[in-house]
Image (cartoon, helix red, strand yellow):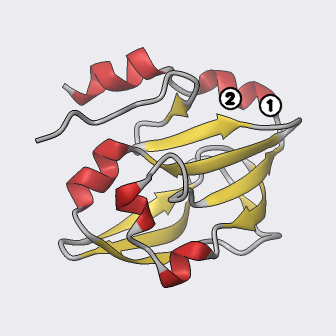
Amino acid sequence: MSELEYPQELRYTSDHEWVRAGNGDTVRVGITSFAQDALGDVVYVSLPTAGDAVSAGDSCGEIESTKSVSDVFSPLTGEVTAVNAALDATPELVNSDPYGEGWMFEMTVADPAQLEELMDVDSYTAQLS
């Protein structure tokens, strides 16, 4: 099995999602390589809609794989500003490039201090073992 990657610059949740801080209060959200590996081949992704208000920890979508269906949780409280429409046609991008082309959605964060409450890469990988 290949070594799973966890980029240093990202923040992580216990639900195996990553958050990449962007410009200002906007962040990009996806699932970690651990999550996509555990799910297996992703066949369908249901995401929130741009304009949706989401709260940290709330389910806001689903990922369907050949093994199971898993919820997508909002890592932070705020408003969804964009979703990755490419996943409609090619959900397998979640498997092949979870930190790049396989991103899920972008959102503006109500309180940017929430980012500091998420795990850094060392805390995230420590809780995996």
| Residue 65's disc number | none
Residue 129 left/right relative to 62: left
The answer to which of 87 and 38 lies nearer the viewer is 87
Name the residue at the top extreme: 122
Q: Quadrant of residue 63?
A: bottom left
What residue does disc 1 label? 112
Location of the C terminus by quadrant is top left
Residue 72 left/right relative to 23: left
Q: Quadrant of residue 49?
A: bottom right
- Kind of residue at disc 1: Pro
**Total count of labels:** 2
Name the residue at the bottom extreme: 89
- Kind of residue at disc 2: Leu
Name the residue at the left extreme: 1
Q: Position of residue 62 (x, y in %)?
A: 45, 71
Disc 2 packing (10 Å; few <14; some 14–19; many ≥20): some
Question: CB atoms at circles 1 and 2 under 8 Å apart?
Answer: yes
What residue does disc 2 label? 115
- Identified at 60% across, 49% down, the residue is 29
Q: Is residue 90 above or below residue 118?
A: below
Location of the N terminus by quadrant is top left
- Identified at 29% across, 24% down, the residue is 127
Q: Position of residue 82 (x, y in %)?
A: 76, 65
Rounded to the nearest whole Å, what is the CA distance between mark 1 and mark 2? Answer: 6 Å
Q: Secondary structure at mark 2?
A: helix
Q: Secondary structure at mark 1?
A: helix
